Image: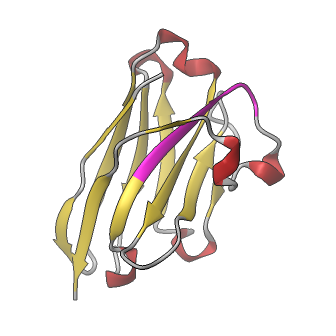
Amino acid sequence: VQLQASGGGTVQAGGSLRLSCVASRSTFSNYGMAWFRQAPGKEREFVSAIDPSGVTRRYLDSVKGRFTISRDNAKNTLYLQMNNLKPEDTAGYYCAARNGRIIVSHMSRAGVYDYWGQGTQVTVSS
């Protein structure tokens, strides 16, 4: 499956952005999905994940209450609504996919995902 992420940009602290990730396959509803991010000089970091049905969601502690992951299986699209953005959220954001369910405790592990998008840059100014 090919993943195309979009929606990044530059915003001031406190602002909002919505990222989208469109999958190329109509079997999108079978895939567990996630967002990761990577800032310059830092390791890739888990942000959020959602199971194929959209019921189970996981978040990085520092984004809980500010970010919301969702999916529209009819549109083969994954979303990340980001509110109250902070300068420390500045990074390249990448969507990732894995065919089938993922053990909940493994949803934050980059290694379980088989497919990755090209990334979209989010810059938050103070």
Any magenta on residue 5?
no
Q: Give the left or right position of residue 58, taking residue 92 as reference.
A: right
Residue 83 or 97: which is nearer the viewer? 97
Q: Give the left or right position of residue 116, taking residue 123 as reference.
A: right
* Number of on-image labels: 0
Quarter of the image where one finds residue 22? top left
Q: Is residue 107 above or below residue 86?
A: above
Q: Give the left or right position of residue 54, taking residue 22 as reference.
A: right
Q: Residue furthest bottom?
A: 126
Residue 98 or 67: which is nearer the viewer? 98
Note whether residue 52 is visible.
yes
- The structure residue drawn at horizontal position 57% and vertical position 55%, both measured from the top left corner, is 48
Q: Is residue 51 above or below residue 99?
A: below
Note whether residue 57 is visible.
no
- Quadrant location of the C terminus in the rendered image: bottom left
Residue 33 or 110: which is nearer the viewer? 110
Q: Range of the magenta residues? A: 94-101
- The structure residue drawn at horizontal position 50% and vertical position 48%, both measured from the top left corner, is 69
- The structure residue drawn at horizontal position 35% and vertical position 80%, both measured from the top left corner, is 86
Quarter of the image where one finds residue 118? top left
Residue 33's x, y, as percent? Answer: 57, 38
Q: Residue furthest front?
A: 41
- The structure residue drawn at horizontal position 53% and vertical position 20%, both measured from the top left corner, is 28
Q: Is residue 15 above or below residue 100?
A: below
Any magenta on residue 99?
yes
The colour scheme used here is secondary structure
Magenta span dominant secondary structure? strand
Residue 109's x, y, as percent? Answer: 70, 54
Q: Is residue 82 above or below residue 1?
A: below
Residue 36's x, y, as percent? Answer: 50, 56
Residue 12's x, y, as percent? Answer: 18, 78
